[in-house]
Image (cartoon, helix red, strand yellow):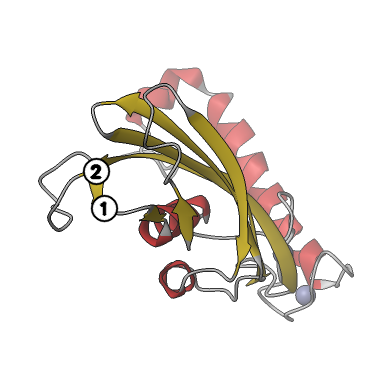
Amino acid sequence: MEVRVSDVKKWAGREESVQVVESWPDEAQARVDYPLANPARVDVRVRNTGGGALIVEVSGTVQAWAVCSRCAESFTIALPFSATEEFRDEAGRNDQSLDYSRFSGDVINLDEVVSDAVGLSFPIAVLCRPDCKGLCPQCGANWNQIECGCRAAVDDRWAQLAQLWVRDTSEPKEELERDNNGRTKT
Ligand SMILES: [Zn+2]
Ligand SMILES: [Zn+2]
């Protein structure tokens, strides 16, 4: 994935915007656990700030076929991404110790900056929706689709715990002598 900079690199203060539409770089797919939907549409803005420096901004939306980490359903996820990187027209290889990237010639390769931005846009755990109810740990039913009978039993236990809690706080005098389990220390 490349952007042509033959014009913008000639004059300080010049700015160009273009949308690059092509397949995601292999490097971007390697960063993400789910298949990315092609083609990529990446908005690229290049600004010449003088002294051979070009500021490259990339942004867009990445779509992928994801699997919900709570209910295991497949769904299409769409995530915004963006990144800014300075490129300098210099001879030599890219060097990690520099806080900019190097380019030479009339094109800048965007694979790395786009792949980094796409990789960072994905959360560690993807959810089909923010309030996904997940699967029943007892029968495996998808709680987004059905109400299984198991849930009531779980709720009963919580209700008993809640009663214990109320009984504890109603005896403030003994509070300091109680440990976290609500029992009196001996
Ligand atoms: Zn889900
Ligand atoms: Zn169940």
Q: Give x and y (percent) for residue 5.
A: 43, 46
Q: 17 and 63: which one is in front? A: 17
As drawn, the label of residue 104 is 1
Q: Does the residue tagged 1 have its C-beta within 8 Å of any atom of ligand 1?
A: no
Q: Is residue 17 above or below residue 37?
A: above
Question: Whereabouts is ligand 1, in terms of quadrant?
Answer: bottom right
Q: Residue at x 63, y 32 (%)?
A: 166
Tag 2 near tag 1, CB within 8 Å: yes
Q: Which residue is mark 2?
A: 89
For the C terminus, the quadrant is top left
Q: Is residue 66 above or below residue 165?
A: below
- Look at the image and tell me whether residue 183 can be seen: yes
Residue 72 quadrant:
bottom right
Q: Give x and y (percent) for residue 121.
A: 51, 51
Q: 5 and 17: which one is in front? A: 5
Q: Residue at x 36, y 24 (%)?
A: 12
Q: Give x and y (percent) for residue 66.
A: 65, 70
Look at label 1 and name its amino acid: Ser
Q: Residue at x 65, y 42 (%)?
A: 162
Q: Is residue 130 left or right of residue 7?
A: right
Q: Is residue 33 above or below residue 89?
A: below
- Look at the image and tell me whether residue 186 can be seen: no
Q: Residue furthest bottom?
A: 139
Q: Is residue 91 left or right of residue 35?
A: left
Residue 44 quadrant:
top right
CA–CA distance in space, label 2 to label 1: 5 Å
